[in-house]
Amino acid sequence: LEKLLATPPDITKGFAAFQKGGCIKCHKIGDQGQDFGPALSAIGTKFTSKQLFLAILKPSETISQGYEGLSIVTDAGTLHTGFVIAETKATLTLRIPGGLQKEILKGSIDLRKRSQVSLMPVGIDAVLLPRELVDLVGWLKTQRAVLPGK
């Protein structure tokens, strides 16, 4: 981690690393990416570089509120995994991969289990070279979109 933090990033290569690492499949920055995991448009105002490296390399250690994974098995034997975005007496609505929503009738739920680990996969360091990881974090630090109401 200290070596990563000591290496100056080339932020012009950060978006390419964001794509290569598969981050774009679950995270949205501006109008790029998928709305599944936390939006990263203002991540540079929220996390230090060290916190970003740790969140990327050890995602289960810091799960953002509202992004605790949930697995549902229905009486038809179908498994659904995602984040709860709405719940009524009759239905449970999950955000599922691809930025989609799945509404499930509560009466059809056989098993409901909260995940103890992040839905963000580990192992990005097997996909990205250390240099690319540095560039990715450097680029993420530049993401400072103004949030509504701020």
Image (spheres, rainbow, N blue to C red):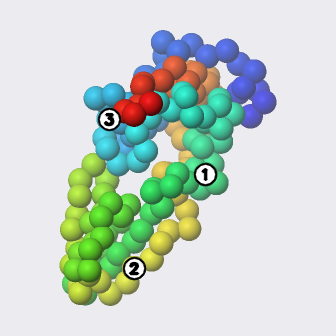
Question: Which residue type carries mark 2?
Answer: Arg
Q: CA distance from mark 3 to mark 1?
A: 21 Å
- Residue drawn at the location 42% of the way across and 68% of the way down: 70
Residue 75 falls left or right of residue 38: left
Q: Secondary structure at mark 3?
A: strand
- Residue drawn at the location 37% of the way across and 44% of the way down: 26
Task: For residue 71, say whether it is visible.
Answer: yes
Q: First in sequence, mark 3 or 1: give its number.
A: 3
Q: Which residue is mark 2?
A: 112
Disc 1 crowd, CA 10 A, few/some/many (<14, 14-19, 20+):
few
Name the residue furthest right. 2
Tell us which disc is closer to us: 3 or 1. 1
Tell me, yes or no, whether the two marked residues, 2 and 1, touch with CB atoms within 8 Å. no
> Residue 44: percent from the left, percent from the top?
54, 27
- Residue drawn at the location 65% of the way across and 29% of the way down: 49
Q: Secondary structure at mark 2?
A: strand
- Which label number is shown at residue 49? none
Q: CA distance from mark 2 to mark 1?
A: 22 Å
Disc 3 crowd, CA 10 A, few/some/many (<14, 14-19, 20+):
many
Residue 39 falls left or right of residue 93: right
Q: Which residue is mark 1?
A: 62
- Residue drawn at the location 64% of the way across and 54% of the way down: 61
Question: Which residue type carries mark 3?
Answer: Gly
> Residue 17: percent from the left, percent from the top?
47, 26
Residue 71 falls left or right of residue 86: right
Q: CA distance from mark 2 to mark 3?
A: 29 Å
Q: How many dots with numbers?
A: 3
Q: Quadrant of residue 135?
A: top right
Q: Which residue is mark 3?
A: 33
